[in-house]
Amino acid sequence: MRPSLIFTTLAASAAAVCFSLIGPTAVAHADKTAQETIDQLQSEGYTVNVDRVGSGRIEDCEVTSVRNPQTQTRPVRDYYGPRDANGDRRFRIIQVVVSQSISVSLNCSN
């Protein structure tokens, strides 16, 4: 694999990891209910782990934190271009997201 392709692949993977660490924490705004926050994270592909204080209804809960985004990836060969004289094709290694999880803390004691 060419060094520039390795660097490009590593840079793209690093950017994806950085976004996954920063992106979800920005979702918990005061204008969203707890259920809306959970639904949004699930629509983004996250498995949401909820921990809560109190036994109130979800409608009465307040999001206190969104944390610990975890993304599991695996390397996959991405073939491209025509086959050469030996029948081989060029490929690059890309990271495919296998699973994502995140924790949401709720205060339901009101």
Image (cartoon, helix red, strand yellow):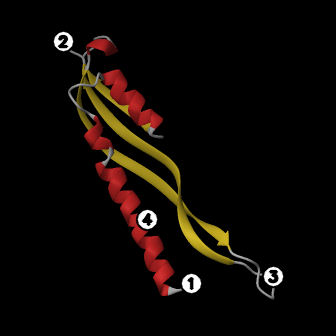
Q: Earlier in the sequence, mark 1 or mark 3?
A: 1
Q: Position of residue 95 (x, y in %)?
A: 52, 63
Q: Is residue 15 above or below residue 110?
A: below
2 vs 1, front mark:
1
Estimate the spatial distance between the alpha carbons at disc 1 and disc 3, rounded to whole Å. 18 Å
User: Secondary structure beneath disc 1?
Assistant: loop
Disc number placed over residue 110 in the picture, else none: 2
Q: Earlier in the sequence, mark 2 or mark 4?
A: 4
Q: Is residue 69 above or below residue 84?
A: above
User: Secondary structure beneath disc 3?
Assistant: loop
Q: Residue at x 32, y 52 (%)?
A: 21
The N terminus: image quadrant: bottom right
Q: Which residue is mark 3?
A: 87
User: Are the residues flagged by discs 3 and 4 in contact, CB closer than 8 Å?
Assistant: no
Q: Earlier in the sequence, mark 2 or mark 1?
A: 1
Q: Residue at x 45, y 39 (%)?
A: 44
Please name the amino acid that badge 3 sits on: Gly
Q: Residue at x 47, y 54 (%)?
A: 72
Please name the amino acid that badge 1 sits on: Met
